Image (cartoon, helix red, strand yellow):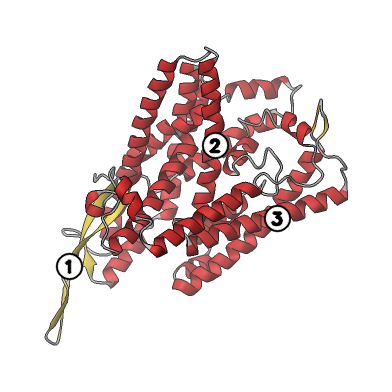
């Protein structure tokens, strides 16, 4: 592995791309610590202590802690992701967006432009909401906003929207001139940025005699097994064989080759967990605004992350959203139509409608174990917290959104680096040019 890693720096273009990517990611992390003007940092730190299990905590995780510190990158890349999801969902129901998706490169450019406009609009609304929210916060250290009013609101909106646009630009530059998907790497770096604090906290607990070394060794082994399982499921595919008919043009024979359609076990990726978390955090978020209401506090106890009821509902919602998002991301009818136009067919299955039904049936069966696995991975950190007493920051690296994003982005980046190595006659990170962990089902 070390030899392969060294080879990646022997290629000037790949070395430049890796350096460019690391440089922009460092800029992003530096910007995540630049505070928004007019904020009392000490009061903010005290007021933001109890947002871990709310929608704001989820937002803070994706921004790498920038939201809880009210920095210029407080909104992070989430407005862009929200705009992308909205555009993608509209592509499944709105004819205009459906036409754009079929127009090739020109259509993609138009969709990218609309996504950027949507990002600015969403970021503006969210920035104004953040400004109002910060003005209402206070702590024993004083008010969070030093000089509330219209001036602070306008300055905050301008700062946060500009920060979001800059982060979006960083992601696009990494994708175009660096290595890997820029937006995904920015999210992954934000999540990983919490790891040093978690590690130092564990070291302090061990040194103070509050945590057994044996427990951390067991947790490390458990994390290794979980990561291996996530890699296997992430890379797992069900291959449907496809045969293309032969065509004779003059003295030449075209077609006749065999290929396959790879149906991923986890087509939906991490999106079902994000949607489910957003829904499950609503009761706790609302309850945090009604501390004196018995009904609100009762609902919060039922939807507490330590409640088995929470785990059951959370897992069920994830299974539902896995099927829902898979249906949007992969359309068997379009696949069958494209195969028919190109003279392809699945052996033993009639082209057209029968092919679409065949693919849909296989996709439905393949998605079931993937959705159940997602539900188990999402719930496991909460079960681990209750069983071992570890805090949420450490438990989040054993499953859920954090682990899936880290593994998925890391695999995608490694595959791109590996492709550069193979193009220049170097072995990839693993022999045979195939990342270990990929499975066929």
Whichever of callouts 3 and 1 sits on the residue coming sooner in the sequence is: 3
Q: Looking at the image, which residue sits at the far left?
A: 251
Answer yes or no: is residue 368 visible: no
Is 184 left, or right, of 134 in this rendering? left
Give coordinates of residue 121: x percent, y percent. Answer: 68, 58
Whichever of callouts 2 and 1 sits on the residue coming sooner in the sequence is: 1
Question: Decide: marks 3, 1 in contact (CB < 8 A)?
Answer: no
Pointer 2 residue: 277
Against 106, residue 134 (above or below) is: above
Q: What's the distance in space between the residues labelled 3 and 1, CA to CA? A: 51 Å
Against 116, residue 231 (above or below) is: above
Q: Where's the N terminus, which quadrant? A: top left
Q: Residues within 10 Å of mark 3 (few under 14, many from 20)?
A: many
Please, what secondary structure does the residue beneath circle 1 have? loop
Pointer 1 residue: 257
Is 299 left, or right, of 327 in this rendering? right
Please, what secondary structure does the residue beneath circle 2 have? helix
Q: Looking at the image, which residue sits at the far bottom?
A: 250
Give coordinates of residue 125: x percent, y percent. Answer: 72, 52
Pointer 3 residue: 161
């Amino acid at each position: 592995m070390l030899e392969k890693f060294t080879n990646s720096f022997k290629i000037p273009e790949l070395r430049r791309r890796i350096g460019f990517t690391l440089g922009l990611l460092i800029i992003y992390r530096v910007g995540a610590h630049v505070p928004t003007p007019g904020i009392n940092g000490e009061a903010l730190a005290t007021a933001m202590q109890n947002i871990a299990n709310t929608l704001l905590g989820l937002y803070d995780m994706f921004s790498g802690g920038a939201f809880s510190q009210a920095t210029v990158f407080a909104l992070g890349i989430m407005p862009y992701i929200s705009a992308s999801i909205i555009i993608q969902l509209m592509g499944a129901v709105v004819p205009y967006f459906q036409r754009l998706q079929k127009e090739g490169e020109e259509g993609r450019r138009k969709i990218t432009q609309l996504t950027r406009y949507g990002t600015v609009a969403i970021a503006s609304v969210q920035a104004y909401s953040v400004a109002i929210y910060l003005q209402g916060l206070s702590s024993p250290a004083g008010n969070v906003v030093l000089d509330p009013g219209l001036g602070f609101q306008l300055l905050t909106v301008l700062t946060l929207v500009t920060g979001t646009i800059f982060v979006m630009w960083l992601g696009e530059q990494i994708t175009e001139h660096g290595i890997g998907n820029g937006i995904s790497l920015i999210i992954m770096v934000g999540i990983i940025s919490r790891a040093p604090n978690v590690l130092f906290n564990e070291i302090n607990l061990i040194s103070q005699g509050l945590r057994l070394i044996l427990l951390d060794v067991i947790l490390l082994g458990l994390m290794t097994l979980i990561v291996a399982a996530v890699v296997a499921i992430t890379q797992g595919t069900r291959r449907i064989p496809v045969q293309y008919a032969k065509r004779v043009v003059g003295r030449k024979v075209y077609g006749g080759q065999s290929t396959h359609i790879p149906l991923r076990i986890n087509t939906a990726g991490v999106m079902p967990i994000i949607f489910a978390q957003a829904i499950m955090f609503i009761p706790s978020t609302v309850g945090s605004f009604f501390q004196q209401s018995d009904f609100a506090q009762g609902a919060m106890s039922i939807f507490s992350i330590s409640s088995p009821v929470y785990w059951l509902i959370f897992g069920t919602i994830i299974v539902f959203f896995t099927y829902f998002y898979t249906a949007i991301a992969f359309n068997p009818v379009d696949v069958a139509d494209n195969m028919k136009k190109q003279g392809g067919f699945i052996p033993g299955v009639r082209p057209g409608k029968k092919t679409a039904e065949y693919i849909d049936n296989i996709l439905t069966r393949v998605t079931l174990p993937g959705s159940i696995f997602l539900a188990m991975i999402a719930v496991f950190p909460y079960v681990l917290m209750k069983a071992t007493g570890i805090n949420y920051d450490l438990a989040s690296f054993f499953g859920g959104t954090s682990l899936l994003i880290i593994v998925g982005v890391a695999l995608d980046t490694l595959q791109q680096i590996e492709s550069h190595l193979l193009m220049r006659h170097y072995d990839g990170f693993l022999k045979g040019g195939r990342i270990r962990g990929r499975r066929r089902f």
